[in-house]
C-alpha cells in the first residue's frame, strides 16, 4: 500500500511539473552612472530614453559613507550628485546613453552645471569597466566636435565608485512635484543654455 501511495504521489508531482510553464530567464540588465548637475533633471532626461528601465538619484565618488543631501550640496564630501541608470542592453547601448547624456549637459562648464555651482555639481561619467571607458571617451570626443559653444570639454570620466541613493523625496521629483520642477528648470536656465551650447535653438 505504501508503494502505491508513493507511486501515485510521484506521478502527481511529475504531472504538475510538466504542466507548469518553463521558467523565463531574467531580463538582461546593465547599469550606468552619470552626473549632470541637478539629479532631478538628469533623472527626467534619462527616463525619456527607450530601453531605460529605471533611474535613481544619488551620490557617488566621495569618501563619506551614507551622505545626506545637506552634506553633499554643501560641498567638501567629494561626492557628486549623480543618477544610476538601469537599462536593457538589447534595446539601448551604453554608447548611446553616453552620447545622449552629453546632449543634456553643458560640457564646457568646469564649475558645476547651470545655476548649481561647485564640484558636487560637476558633469561626469562614472565608468565601471574598459568597455564603458572606451565608449565614454568616444562620446566625449564626439561632443567636442559637435558643440557650438567654444572651449574645452570639462566633463570628467571617473572610475565607478559606491553609489548611495538619495533621500526618498528626491526620487522621481519631477513626477511628484511637476510645477516646482518646471519652475526650477526654467529659472536655472538649463534648457536655454543647452540651446546655446548645442545650437538647438
Image: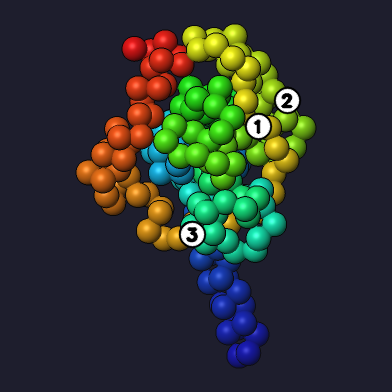
Image: 87 above or below 176: above
Report the side of 168 relative to 74 (left or right): left
SS at mark 3 in the image: helix
- x then y, percent, for residue 81: 53, 46
* Residue that appears at 44% across and 32% down: 114
Regarding residue 47, the answer to whether it shows in the image is: no
Residue 149: where, in percent of width, then height? 50, 12
How far apart marks 2 and 3 lie (CA) works out to: 34 Å
Give the number of the mark in front: 2 or 3.
3
Q: Position of residue 184 (x, y in %)?
A: 31, 40
Determine which residue is flagged by label 3. Answer: 70
**Neighbour tally class for label 2: few under 14, some 14-19, many 20 plus, Cα within 10 Å:** few
Residue at the disc numbered 2? 134
- Colour basis: rainbow
Q: Are marks 1 and 2 in contact (CB under 8 Å)?
A: no
**Residue identified by numbered label 1:** 156
Looking at the image, which residue is at 38% across and 13% down?
Answer: 200
Q: Which of marks 1 and 2 is in front?
A: 1
Q: In which quarter of the image is the C terminus?
A: top left
Amino acid at each position: 500500500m505504501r508503494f502505491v501511495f508513493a507511486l501515485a504521489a510521484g506521478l502527481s508531482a511529475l504531472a504538475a511539473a510538466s504542466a507548469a510553464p518553463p521558467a523565463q530567464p531574467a531580463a538582461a540588465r546593465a547599469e550606468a552612472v552619470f552626473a549632470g548637475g541637478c539629479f532631478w533633471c538628469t533623472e527626467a532626461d534619462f527616463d525619456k530614453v527607450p530601453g531605460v528601465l529605471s533611474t535613481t538619484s544619488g551620490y557617488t565618488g566621495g569618501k563619506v559613507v551614507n551622505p545626506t543631501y545637506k552634506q553633499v550640496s554643501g560641498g567638501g564630501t567629494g561626492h557628486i550628485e549623480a543618477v544610476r541608470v538601469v537599462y536593457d542592453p538589447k534595446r539601448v547601448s551604453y554608447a548611446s546613453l553616453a552620447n545622449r547624456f552629453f546632449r543634456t549637459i553643458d560640457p564646457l562648464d568646469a564649475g558645476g552645471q547651470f545655476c548649481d555651482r561647485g564640484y558636487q555639481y560637476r558633469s561626469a561619467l562614472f565608468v565601471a569597466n574598459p568597455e564603458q571607458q572606451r565608449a565614454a571617451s568616444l562620446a566625449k570626443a564626439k561632443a567636442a566636435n559637435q558643440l557650438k559653444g567654444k572651449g574645452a570639454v570639462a566633463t570628467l570620466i571617473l572610475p565607478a565608485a559606491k553609489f548611495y541613493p538619495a533621500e526618498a523625496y528626491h526620487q522621481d521629483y519631477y513626477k511628484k512635484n511637476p510645477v516646482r520642477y518646471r519652475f526650477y528648470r526654467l529659472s536655472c536656465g538649463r534648457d536655454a543654455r543647452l540651446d546655446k551650447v548645442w545650437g538647438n535653438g
